[in-house]
Image (cartoon, rainbow, N blue to C red):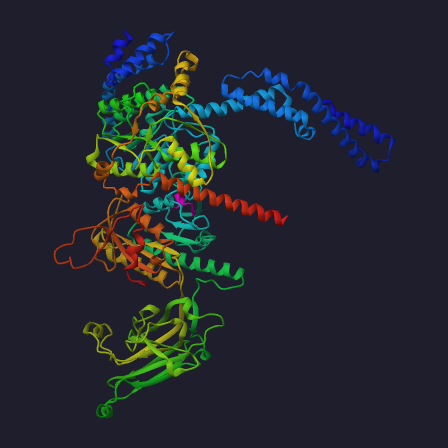
Amino acid sequence: MKMATLMRLPTATPGRVVTRTREAFHALSPSPSPSPPHFVEFCKGGRRGRRIIRVGVKCNSNSERAVNLGPGTPVRPTSILVVGATGTLGRQIVRRALDEGYDVRCLVRPRPAPADFLRDWGATVVNADLSKPETIPATLVGVHTVIDCATGRPEEPIKTVDWEGKVALIQCAKAMGIQKYVFYSIHNCDKHPEVPLMEIKYCTENFLRDSGLNHIVIRLCGFMQGLIGQYAVPILEEKSVWGTDAPTRIAYMDTQDIARLTFIALRNEKINGKLLTFAGPRAWTTQEVITLCERLAGQDANVTTVPVSVLRLTRQLTRFFEWTNDVADRLAFSEVLTSDTVFSVPMAETYNLLGVDTKDIITLEKYLQDYFTNILKKLKDLKAQSKQSDIFF
Amino acid sequence: MSTSPSATTIAAAVYSKYNNINTTLSVSGQINTTFLSYTKKQHTRSSSVQRLPPIAAAPNTRDGKDSKSNTQNNNNDDDDDNDDKQSVSLSLDDVNPVGLGRKSRQIFDEVWRKFSGLGQISRTIRTDDVEALDALLVREGPMCEFAIPGAQNTTVLVVGATSRIGRIVVRKLMLRGYSVKALVRKADEEVVELLPRSVEIVIGDVGDPNTVKAAVEGCNKIIYCATARSTITGDLFRVDQQGVYNLSKAFQDHNNQLAQLRAGKSSKSKLTIAKFKSESSLDGWEVRQGTYFEDVVTSKYDGGMDAKFEFTENGAAVFSGYVFNRGGYVELSKKLSLPLGSTLDRYEGLVLSVGGNGRPYVLILEAGPSGDPSQSKLYFARISTKVGFCRVRVPFSSFRPVKPDHPVLDPFLVHTLTIRFEPRRQRSDMVNASKNQDSRSFQLILEYIKALPTGQETDFVLVSCSGLGIEPSRREQVLKAKRAGEDSLRRSGLGYTIVRPGPLQEEPGGQRALIFDQGDRISRGISCADVADICVKALHDSTARNKSFDVCYEYVAEDGNELYELVAHLPDKANNYLTPALSVLEKNT
């Protein structure tokens, strides 16, 4: 029965190979509750979502009445809400928006240490939690555009924020008459339903399209900023760097460029309802990135290469037990790594559509070079300072 | 183990019982050390006994990697056994099974984090890394695309921080790492909410010199984007005219004050060349007359000319006279004696405070090696004055050589200043304006002549307006107040940038090409964000210093107007549009 629902999935487009693995997996699965049933639920959720949208439409008429009550204060097109503003991409979106003169509101989870830097830049911070839908509507009042770059933290179950929270947010946005919704998805998410996060993103894309909101979906490949913590810092600190031997190539992109292109797309009425994919200028394997870092840092890295097969094995093992399911979800990307995919798209058409010059997009070489020259200079300064103080005392 | 410290104290106490109190300290110190070395030995001995079991029983050997690291630990421990010196550095934690467990747990976590990281799509950086990376990538570090070198040490006062432009200006400054002070009228909750949290809020009114004084304290630059809320003349005067004057004055005072603390002179203050406040201040000025050409025949019938420079009873230095000769002129000249250490090359121009009946004059500078007057070259600039008192700003760049083949004026070499009056045929409307007075007679009341300092950057950015989009009935008044404000800024000696935007629109900036122009030709609006961006960019742009310009969105020229060459500049991250746009515009306008 579960399989039947599975086949009716909108996401069930992928090739047979995937389905077969899933079948095999079901055969192996000892308990009825490991991860795949979640996805069945997602699909149900998709349908349920549509049903709820009808409710949302009802809400919409309500809100129209509300609008009629106060026709004197139209929503300013410069008011935007950024969801996930503290993240790697989110903060760049906020900065860009502020710099371009938008009034930015940031939806941030209530936390002991609030995101001070957002307020320092001049954004308004509102507390809400996507996993608590009742907190969402208040944050959307007076907002013209919602930019959604939120993703759940790795330590929490993927479903709460990324699916249920997003569904609630989209429904709420629809009900409250948000005029544009920008959603960040993952490149190739339609081709890898076996990766929970990617399947969720794909389902959300569909849900957003079905909701009838004026929207833009932007699929991303990888962030250059992530490479710093992953490779550059460990190499400089002479710690071991972990990499895989996967042949997968990813076209990393600077989040500042992503933010810039996003706002160009946002203002372009022709792009409404479209699906854009942003990829960096070149696709890199992990090994290539490490080699580049080594060259720029001028020192050899202590590389620990983990074969992808080990990753896969761990994932398969952890899927057996319910209490390790989150772990399995986290390792899910290894499934993608084994395939010889290239996470990249030709960008010429997108650049053309947006009217952007290719040479304005920063390359990974340049990005890392900037990073290393800056950090090496800083280290040198620090050393010089400590030397000076030695003499001093 | 925990008993050993208490044992020492007891021993010390016992010792002190039998000994003189004075010696106790030193002796007990000795005892302490011996005890310590003893306990250390105890440590090593007990640890060597205890060491193996906890590792064997380490509960966290879930992973092969982890056990590998444990065996490494074992090896280390063996080394310790052999080497007594190294074992001294071991602490209690090293042998504590709980501590070991924690340690191996940490190692395991680290390994697991890296391992699981490989299987993830996007990496979430650990919280402890975030701070360090943020500093470099996001906040003030060089990797941040907004970072501006020098912004850290610059404090900018934003006047009118809650205005449409001001709000964005404040945000832009914060993003770039400036320290920002905001002058607001009232610190309501609403206002405070509107501004970034780390902005220093100063409550005050631009119309009140006292509050303004407090606001400029510690500031390096000012961006003035306050504007009158109504078109009532009183409001206009207070905000657009007096406000600018108050701020520029307070800022200059502040600079001077700082300079006095250093026992020097502010580099932004003007240099007094001549101040005519007493009889003696007229010394050194000589009146001369001459003609451009010798016309023997006509000079016989001409009425001649005469001029005098005198200090009147009511305390004014008046240069007056008449020239009825064709081609004749009278002039007032002085060899400049500058204070020691100051040379005119550090100044940008002259400002004259004069009154009189509004005749045009010619300022002549003689430049050349001071020892050899025969090598002097002459440079001139025409100035016009108004009836009544006015201040005239004459930049050195507007002086032209009398002989066209001479090089441009080098202010360093200037040694003589001359004010010349020559009767010129005047336009009929000017004749009417001067009530049919004979344009060949003149009266010039001199108050002072000062030199305006030069500098690299602008000190004061003023957002004025181009006069478009104001309701026609009040336009004159608004423009008058704005222009008066601009003028008071130009004469203050501060480096200024005056931005006159077209009608403001609430739109995101950076998406449309802009036009920079001088001379009231623009016809389009501009977004507040673009104006804010220009203000912020102008702070460190040497081409923006001492310039006034109109700015608006690009437009298609109307018929008959397309002759004007208006270059559009698209603001973008990649190019600094302001420098090329402004470098073609004229300075000192």
x, y percent for residue B176: 40, 45
Magenta-colored stretch includes residue B176: yes
Task: Give the x, y percent position of residue A375.
Answer: 46, 42
The range drawn in magenta is: B173-180
Question: What residue appears at the point 30 percent right and 10 percent down from the top-left corner?
Answer: A23
Q: Quadrant of residue A51?
A: top left
Residue A31 against residue B523 in the figure, above or below: above
Front residue of B549/A282: it is A282
In the rendered image, residue A40, in percent from the top left (x then y), is placed at: 30, 13
Q: Tell me: B482 left or right of A157.
A: left
Q: Nearer the viewer, residue A337 or B451?
A: A337
Q: Give the x, y percent position of residue A319.
A: 39, 14
Left or right of A45: which side holds B411? right
- Res. B213 visible in picture: yes
Residue B512 forms part of the magenta stretch: no
Q: Quadrant of the N terminus of chain B?
A: top right
Image height check: is B104 above or below B89?
A: above
Q: Is residue A118 visible?
A: no
Query: In which quarter of the view is residue B191 placed?
Result: top left
What's the residue at 30%, 45% (across, down)? Answer: B529
Image quadrant occupied by the C terminus of chain B: bottom left
